[in-house]
Structures are given as C-alpha cells and as structure tokens.
Amino acid sequence: MREQFTRFLAFFLPSETGREVRAIFVHAWQVRFRLFGRNCVDFFRLTEKGKRVRMDFLKQLGLQVFLLAITLTVMFPILWIFSLALDPRNIDKPLELTLIPPGASFAAFQKVLCEPFMLLCSNPSDLGTCMTFGRLLLNSVLVALGTSLFAVVMGASAAYAFSRFQFVGRQAGMLGFIVLLMLPTTATLAPLYVLLSQIKIAGEPLRTTLIGLSVAYASGTLPFAIWNLKGYFDTVPKELEEAARIDGASVTQTFLRIILPLSVPALAVTVLFSFMTGWTEFVLAWTFLEDPSRFTLAMALRSMQGQFSTPWSEFAAMSILMSIPIVLLFFALQRYLVSGLTVGGVKG
Amino acid sequence: MATQVAPLDRRLKRREDFKQRLKRSPLAWAYIAPAGLLMVLITMFPQIFQVWMAFTDYRIQNLRFNVFNSETWEQYAPAMVGIENFVKILTNNLAIENYDFGRLLLFNITWTFTNVIFHVGLGILIALALNSKHLIGRRIYRALFVLPWAIPGYINALTWRNMFDQNFGAINQLLAVLNTNLGTSFATDIRWLEATTPPLGGLLSFLPLAFYALLITNVWLGWPFMTVVATGALQAIPDELYEAAAIDGANAWNKFWSVTVPMIRPAMVPAIMLGTIWTFNNFNVIYFITKGGPFGRTEILVTQAFKLVYEQRIYGVAAAFSLVVFLILLVITLINNRVTRATEAYNA
C-alpha cells in the first residue's frame, strides 16, 4: 500500500521535492485515510490498471444511488409521522407535503408526556386517578420485560432439550411447536379468558394481572423462540460439551456454562422479539385487564383512536415515543440480529 | 415375507437405541416441562376447546358457559350441530355481506405469494448491495434499514392508511410534487383504498387497487427481515468460492446463481416458510388499512375470522373457520416443505 501511495503522490508532487517532504505527505495521507476509514482507501484504490479504479468508482456510485433510493422510501413514512406530530392543527392528513408544517411545535409531545389520559381513569371524576405517560410506561416495561424473561428462560431450556437429547417424542414435540405457530388464535380468546379467570393468585384472577398478560404473550412467542434457539444450539459444537462432561460437569452445568454463553446472539433475538410483542400488543390486553392502573402504552395509543375524532398530532407523537424504545433496542442488539437469526437452523 | 423383517441384530440394536433414548427422556422432558406446560395450558387447551366449539352452535348466549363450573353446563351449553358450521363456511351459506369462501382463499393465496416473492427478492438484492466490498456508509444503511421492522406494526399500518387517503394522503401529494417538478402527469386523486375498478384486467381482475396499495405497504414492512437473514447467510460464504468461480470464467450472473443462491438457500428456506405463515395470517396490515374493503375484496381469512368473532359474534362458526384456516396453512407448509426439499435433491 505504501508504495502505491508514494507512486501516487510522486505523480502530483514536483519531481524535485525532497524525499523527506514526500515521506511526510505520504504519512499525512495515510493518517487521513485511517481516520476516514478503510473503505475510502479501497475506494480510491490505485492499481496498475486505471480501468479497475473506474469500475470500482462506477460500482460504488451505482450502489450508493440504489441504497439512497431505498433509504428515501424507508424514511418517507417515518418523516411523515414526524411532520404530523409537529403539526399544531391536529389533522390526520395535512394539505401539502411539508417536513416542518406551519406553526410547528412540540406541544403534542408535551401534552402526551405531561398531561393525564382522560380516557383511562379508575374514577372518571377524579383526575388524580387517571393514567399518566410515566405510569403507562412502567406497566409496558413490566409486561415487556416479563414476556421476554418467560420466553427466554422457557424457550432456551426447551430448545436445549430438542437440540441435544435423543428422546422419545422429540420429533412429535418439535412438530407440535411448529404447528402451534400456524394456528390462528382468533376464536381462542374466549376459552383463554375463562381459563385465566379461574387461576387465582392472591385472590385475584391471573387474567387481570400483568403477570398473567406476560405469560399469555410468552406462550405466543415461544414456538418461534424454541425453533430459532434450537437451530442456533445445533450450531454449537458438541465437542465443547463432551470435554466439559469429561471434566465432571453435569448436563445442567454444561447448559448454563457453555451453551448459553455461546448463544448470546440467538438469546438476544428472542429477547428482542418477545419484548416487542409485550410492548405493542393491545387486543389481548384490552380484553383481559380491568383496572386502568394496569393499562399499557399500547392500550393508551389504541384508546386515542376515537370513534368520532382522533387527536392526530398527539397520536403521532405517542406513536413516535412508543417506537423509540423498540428502535433503540434494535440498534443495541443489531450486531446479534444477523448472527442470531438462524431461523430454524441450517445445520440439521 | 421373511425378507421384510430386519435382521435380528439390527432389530436388537434398534431396541437398545430405543431403551437408551427412553432412559434419557425424563431429563429431556424436564427441560421441556416449563415451556411445555405453559403451551399446554395457554395454547393447547384453548385450541382443543376451539375444536369442540367448531362442532357446536356457540353464540353470544353461551358465553356464560364455563368448563370448570358444572353448574353452568346445563343452562349454557351450546347445541352440537356436527359439521354444519363447516358446510356453511364452504358453501357460502353464512348470512354475511360479501362473503365468498373461494374468493377469500384465492385472494389470501395471491396475497401471500406476491408478498413473499417481493420480500425475498428485494431482501436478497439489498443484502447483496449491503454486503458488497468497500461499500461506503454500510453501518448507516444497516441501521436505517431495520426501521420498518422496528416500528410497531399497528403504527405502521395506520400511517400507511392515512398516506393512501384520496384527498390529503402523502402518496397522492407525492405524485403531485413529481408532476410539478418532473413534468410528469400522474393522476393525483387516486382512490387507492376505495376504487372498485381493477387496474389490471383479465386474470388479475379480482384484485382491486387496494390490493396494490396493501402490497406496497407490506413489502415496505417485510423486506428488512429477509435482508437480515440473507445478510447472515451471505457473510458465511467463503471468498474462495467466488475466486474459484472467477477462475472458471464465471461472470457476476453465473456467480450469483451457482455460488450465492445455493449457499444462502439453507438459511432462506426456513425464513421463507416463516414468512409465508406470517404473511398468510397478516392481520394488522389488512385490518387497519382497508378493513377488507372495498366490498370485502381485500379480505383475507384471518380478518374474516376476526369479524366473525367481534362483529357477527357467531363463535362456533368462527372456531370452525379458524380450523379451516389452519388446515389450509398446514397444506401450504407441507407443499412448501416438499418443493424446497425436492429442489435440494435436484441440485445435489
């Protein structure tokens, strides 16, 4: 690489320039390239054939045009929600396409964050009993975390059994979980309602508690979690476990100490998916929960969609606020996303 | 006849294997137990109840029926009607507007396959672009491209519904902007979700314009998942394979079909199966954008099932309907599995 730079610079610098000066230039360029990222060095790569450079440049240009076009389509609806949220007129369909509408303000955000939700009150005559964004957020976090906890713990242990043991009923069990993924749950709401009303914890039916809701969500995310985790566990070499077993580790120890630490990507994907379910679901929540003090953000968002009118700016602001945690979680777990999603396992 | 019986030693070995597996079974089942119990309780029980409901005339007055309370049995148990529900569903004898089972099924299958084709095609194309060497801004693109997936589905669906509005929607406004700036002459008062005259005639005349609007929305939502899966698979392909192909004189097209496609297929097949199930049952997009309109022509099976429960309140019919949906999905998955496996054998 160094020779190429030297040759490249020698072309531009006057030939009488001293070697030292040239060396300094070369160094400066290299530092700059290093700061700018390796990609750039390759981008302006100098090969003997000038043609190759042009090819790379054209290819880069084509790719950038393509990817920027995709970026535009991805961002268009998102920017549109932003402009709705900033619009003080509370309309669902602005008259023209503007990123920043006339009289834009953060009033809608402020209202959603600070004012009580009038529709979600234990006692409608007392504003103090109404839900606020903070309390809704707390409930949502509890439900979402509960869902992911149940899904990860149960999913990982079941997936481990399917991946590592040859036992009676293995095929049938695995098939059963995949079939469950396909069953539409529309008409099961009524029996589930009855069932969860029967199970009582501390005198309260499980149905009306946040734990009950988390458990119900977890059962919905489990089939995919087990399928995906099993596929990932299959790719962890068996030799590692065998070595540990020879050293005297029990099955449970190898599972906890070897398989789980090596499967962080797949576990992260499970957490992400189940967290998302718990965070965004509202149909089950509306049917099950009774006490407004247990309502979640997704339910509050749904309640904003009134029969006659919807406060659109607030709805948009709330949508954005609700999306931010999920988007951040996606970004945080992104490096696991690609490797953790083996979807059913490539290796048989 | 005797030739059909396996040799004695092999039979003994098989029995020995079975004993071995049986011996390891309790531990395996212990690992599966938490997830298994939860699934049996929360998912299996309501599903079995649903099967029973499908053969009864379960209506709103039967909702007080409680399996766990024998006092309610006498008074509220629904009448058994045998397969009458199924017959009604398949012969279009339900007293519901715009109900036609054949059309629903045809639309549902068309919807699923067009979507999955676009998801996979676009997903792989973008993954290839993102995976090309020396791409500038790879990380930024990757971060931005998960956004459609990360934003909660309900929010996405409502945003797109507003964007397709005839008078004030962003899509028509965008067309107007294009018209003024590029001199094109698109119609800017397109009734995306309500128009009844199909844009394409002939065989495709059963698809209203709303179908294409829904398709755009769901393609926007769906490709990032496929891109992530394809990226994982692409990163696992060793460079040597491409180099070897180059030595053999392969051009980019040949390389794609004889190196890339076979190498990413094992990861894509389960993802495609999963995507098929998800799209087939994609409730959010259809229900929150068109509600099945215009005149039920974009109704899919799960939205119809939902309406049977929440609008018509004929629970028995809804349960039967869910079972029919499940059977159809099972058949599609089996065919899918068969086709993908068959091509595997063909390549090998």
Image (cartoon, helix red, strand yellow):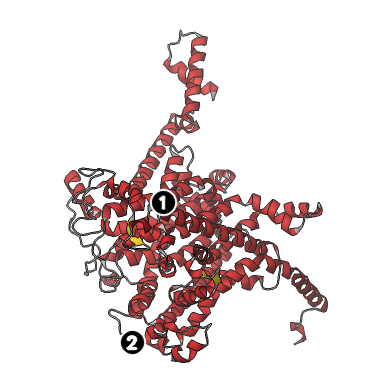
Q: Within 10 Å of the Cα at label 1, are there few (<14), some (14-19), or many (20+) other Cα atoms?
A: few
Front one among B295 and B115 = B295
Secondary structure beneath disc 2? loop
Quadrant (top left, top right, bottom left, bottom right) of the C terminus of chain A: bottom right
Q: Position of residue B110 (x, y in %)?
A: 37, 69
Chain under numbered label 1:
A
Q: Within 10 Å of the Cα at label 2, are there few (<14), some (14-19), or many (20+) other Cα atoms?
A: some
Q: Which mark is residue B93?
A: 2
Q: Which mark is residue B324?
A: none
Q: Which mark is residue A134?
A: 1
Q: Amino acid at mark 2?
A: Asn
Q: Position of residue B63 (x, y in %)?
A: 42, 82
Residue at 77%, 57% in the rendered image = A250
Q: Is residue A265 above or below residue B41?
A: above
Q: Is residue B52 above or below residue A207?
A: below
Give a yes or no on whether discs 1 and 2 share a subunit: no
Chain under numbered label 2:
B
Secondary structure beneath disc 1? helix
Front one among B138 and B37 = B37
Q: Amino acid at mark 1?
A: Gly
Q: Position of residue A291 (x, y in %)?
A: 42, 65
Front one among A226 and B37 = B37
Residue at 66%, 70% in the rendered image = A170
Q: Position of residue A263 (x, y in %)?
A: 62, 52
